[in-house]
Image (spheres, rainbow, N blue to C red):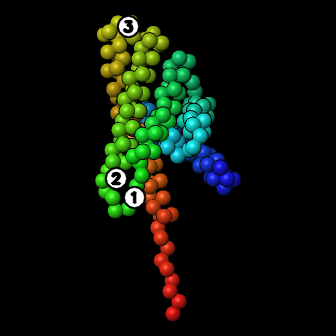
Amino acid sequence: MDNSKRIGEYLAFIGLVSAGISLRLFFRDLPNFAPVAALALFSGYFFRSRVMALAVPLTIMLASDLVLGGYQPVLMATVYAMLALPVAARGILRRVFRFEQGRWSRNAAAACGLLACGLASSILFFVVTNFAAWSAMGIYDRSWSGLLHCYVQGLPFFRFTLAGDLGFALVLFAGYAIAKSVVRQPQPKIVAA
């Protein structure tokens, strides 16, 4: 990789992490409404290096948790893992997220692919982190009814997770698609008179 591309990726990394930390702190009063999973999806799509892509959500979480504070270690590790998991959708997103002018069907496929990946990330986060809360925190009965109670208690948080994951993903990917289309626009030819 040439130096200009490497520098561009480092700048993108710094920008994504800075935005992620700022937005997570700004929206801290809305439980689970954060850009971290969306940034993980985008990082998986954008960065060539899986390590750099994984570093985006993990760096955001580590840095913002220094301000927000930590919580139960098993639950915290589960949350971090589930917020890094969307990077794994990189193959799907790279196949479907290719916007080309004049090809609505491809644009619709890209939007559907993005929404499916975002929805899957949100649902997996909800299912796995609530199971971890039930099993590790000791505040729910160790029974099927206790597990069900844990999931019911998590539903209000799930709506914020879903809104944040899908909303931020749409903004990120749409912004990227618009930026790419602007850069690709052919320049008008100037004819000398």
- The residue at 57%/43% (across/down) is 48
Disc 2 to disc 3: CB gap under 8 Å: no
Mark 3: secondary structure: loop
Instruction: Give the residue at mark 1.
Output: 100
Q: Residues within 10 Å of mark 3 (few under 14, many from 20)?
A: some
Q: Residue at x 58, y 27 (%)?
A: 69
Q: Position of residue 8 (x, y in %)?
A: 62, 52
Picture quadrant where residue 49 is located? top right
**Residue 138 location (% of width, % of height):** 45, 9
The answer to which of 60 and 10 lies nearer the viewer is 10
Image height of 171 relative to 82, above or below: below
Crowding near pointer 1: few (<14 within 10 Å), some, many (20+)?
few
Task: Tell me: 51 left or right of 27.
Answer: right
Total tally of numbered discs in the picture: 3
Label ID, residue 106: 2
Q: Name the kind of residue labelled 1 in the image.
A: Glu
Q: Earlier in the sequence, mark 3 or mark 1?
A: 1
Q: Disc 3 marks which residue?
A: 141
Do the residues bearing badges 2 and 1 touch, measured as CB atoms within 8 Å?
Answer: yes
Which callout, 3 or 1, points to the residue nearer the camera?
1
Label 2: which secondary element: helix
